[in-house]
Amino acid sequence: MRIGIPRVLLFYRYYPMWKAFFEALGLEVVPSSITNKEIVDISVEKSVSEACIPIKLVYGHILDLKDKVDFIFLPRIVGLEYRTYMCPKFIGIPDMIRNASLDIPPIIDPTIDKRNSLTGFFKSFLELGRLFTKNSLKIIQAYTEGLKALKSYNEELRRGITPLDILDGKNYGGEDFNIKIGIVGHCYEIYDEFISGGMIKILNRLGVKVLSMEMIDWRAILREANVLPKKLFWTFGRELYGTARYFIRKGLVDGIIMVVAFGCGPDSLVRELIERDLTKPINFPEITITIDEHSSELGLITRLEAFVDMLIRRKQYEDNLSSVW
Amino acid sequence: MKITYPPFGDARIAIESFLRDFGHEVIPPPPSTNRTLSIGVKYAPEFACLPLKITLGNYIESIEKGADTILMLGGIGPCRFGYYAEVQRRILKDLGYDMDWIVLDLSNGWMNLFRSIKKIVNGNSVIKVIKALRLAWEKVLALDKIEKISRKARPFERYKGEVDNIVRETHKKLDQAGSISQVRQVLSEYRETMDSIIDEDSLEELVKIGIVGEFYVVLDHFTNFEIARRLGELGVWAENAFYIEDIVRIYLPLFRNKDIEERTRVALPYIKRSVGGEGQRTVAHTIEFAERGFDGVIHLSPFTCMPEIVAEGILERVSKDYDIPVLTLSIDEQTGLAGITTRIEAFIDMLKTKKRRRMAG
Ligand code: SF4
Ligand code: SF4
């Protein structure tokens, strides 16, 4: 039996785990194609026009899998930590897909809700495994395999290897350049090169070392975010805020690029917090890149170049200052 | 302490009533206008949802009138509402307005909630508090009835604006009413007047539309371009899926009752769990209107509202399954009245033709 996994949303965070889990249960795992023009076009046609591009792309990736698999895995991810939520669209996406008249194989949409349980993912995966086998032991083994895969994936990410490197077998983040930029955005925006317009590679060509959230210890990020008097209740929001604060406070980067999907609900507020609390008061260099299905690569390159130029000039100025002193 | 609050629709009258009864100096937010909106738009994040922008404008206009304290609700997501106060607080602070915020928010712990409630209660005795709350609640119920009846009456008004005038007068009296019996008196006078306008025998011939969507835009007349009035003037009987009472029951746990959950149950085959805001309810209410034999549904959604985008993605199927036309109107500061009117009129025309055909055959 073949199970399809669309290359969207938390794919970039959990794919190795899901793959190991399903394979241990004896399924063949088929990821959807890397986002291409065709997927984008059909996504735009089939989805609600007001949805953000990451949600739109789910439609296209599901259709990409349509004739290749027996089931499609599209979990309903409600929350990943105590008293936090994912964005409402994450919670509703399986229902949106199911009701969209797409004529697709059955959707498997286990609810993943880690908010109130100590057992973590385990309960969701146990239920998920039951769909394919009655043997609980086998499910537990598969789950352990999944966790192992996730652990080594995360270790690689921590070492500064991006999901792109792992997919392409190259190294985009590792080399030491003079200018360092922290990218603050969701994994499914940054690492889907269609959405992000290949931002990381462009920056690399411009001689910039790129840092992203995946390279920092998750707990350290959350600690940064917990300084807020009212904690953010979106996991992503906390991660974005925490990452930005970590980058700035530890002096790891010369500037920050915020990547925001057009019409993204949570980020409209989180971005405001980052600006008002973190960057504006100290004049920290920052730009926001808004992305949607119409974004042009040319426009992106121009903006990135201008930003990098500014950082270089700023750095030279600071170096001059310090040599004078 | 000069206290103000975010108004939504007619609820302002009830909120003002109990704050006043607690002995606060109340600065009621001036009625929302285009100025309110443009102030809000100027200072709020570009992609924030419309209610955040308008209420920000309301606060600033209240501050201009001397307010120094803001009463607001908080909470935990998944939609943005629970974080409004945090963002608005920062914006006002950066503008130089250091406001005292009373945020009723359980997620900051019981102690904080208790402290906020104490500030509102303002040293009043338990009996006085209960009395004030009962009166405010009676006003809420009355406001809802006034609104519901006005929807029925407008298609029959004898001159344009007749119903609005009566409603306005009644609201004034309601605002002044100091006891439950006075509230009831005001309401029964209103009923009598309206009964003389409504032509009960022709009610069934009217096109009936249900209004569903995000609560603020459904209940706030300014935000929704006074859609109820416009529909009434087009000879349509428009009912809301919910009124102020329902929203109080949904968002204040103290008032919660089982009906709220019961009502969402019909949506489960389409949307398995709540996605925050009104998302799941919007689907449920659309089905409810279809089952009650309404001719169509208008779905109001603030631009970028996440729960309503999920709902919109599902309503297409519901509309087919239940054979009920649904018009989604997404509203933000760029939405022009002209565009909305054209779309509504086309929708109504379609429904009228459909209804005529059905009644004929
Ligand atoms: S968090 Fe933002 S980008 Fe992600 S699904 Fe929600 S609205 Fe879209
Ligand atoms: S329900 Fe929609 S409009 Fe209301 S706060 Fe949530 S996201 Fe904003």
Image (spheres, coloured by chain):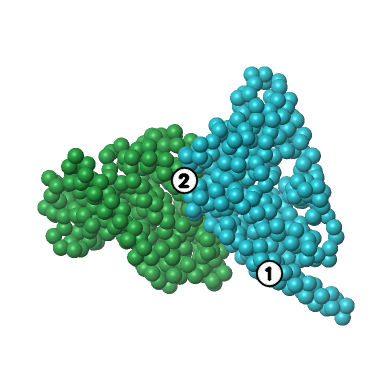
Residue type at mark 2: give it: Gly
Residue B110: percent from left, percent from top: 53, 45
Residue A31 percent location from the top left of the image: 67, 39
How crowded is the residue under tag 2: few (<14 C-alpha within 10 Å), some, or many (20+)? many
Q: Which mark is residue B174?
A: none
Q: Is residue B181 left or right of residue B48?
A: left
Colour that chain A carries in the picture: cyan
Apparent side of residue A141 relative to residue B31 in the rendered image (left or right): right
| Mark 1, secondary structure of its residue | helix
Position above or below: A3 against B228: above
- Residue furthest bottom as drawn: A324
Q: Chain of mark 2?
A: B
Is any part of residue B60 visible from this angle? Answer: no
Between B196 and B137, the one nearer to me in the picture: B196
Which residue was labeled with disc 1? A302
Q: Is residue A323 above or below residue B228?
A: below
Residue corresponding to mark 2: B313
Which shade of the palette goes to chain B?
green
Q: Where residue B116 sits: x, y (%)?
A: 49, 53
Three-letter amino acid code of the residue under disc 1: Thr
Query: Which residue appears at 47% of the width and 63% of the height?
Result: B53
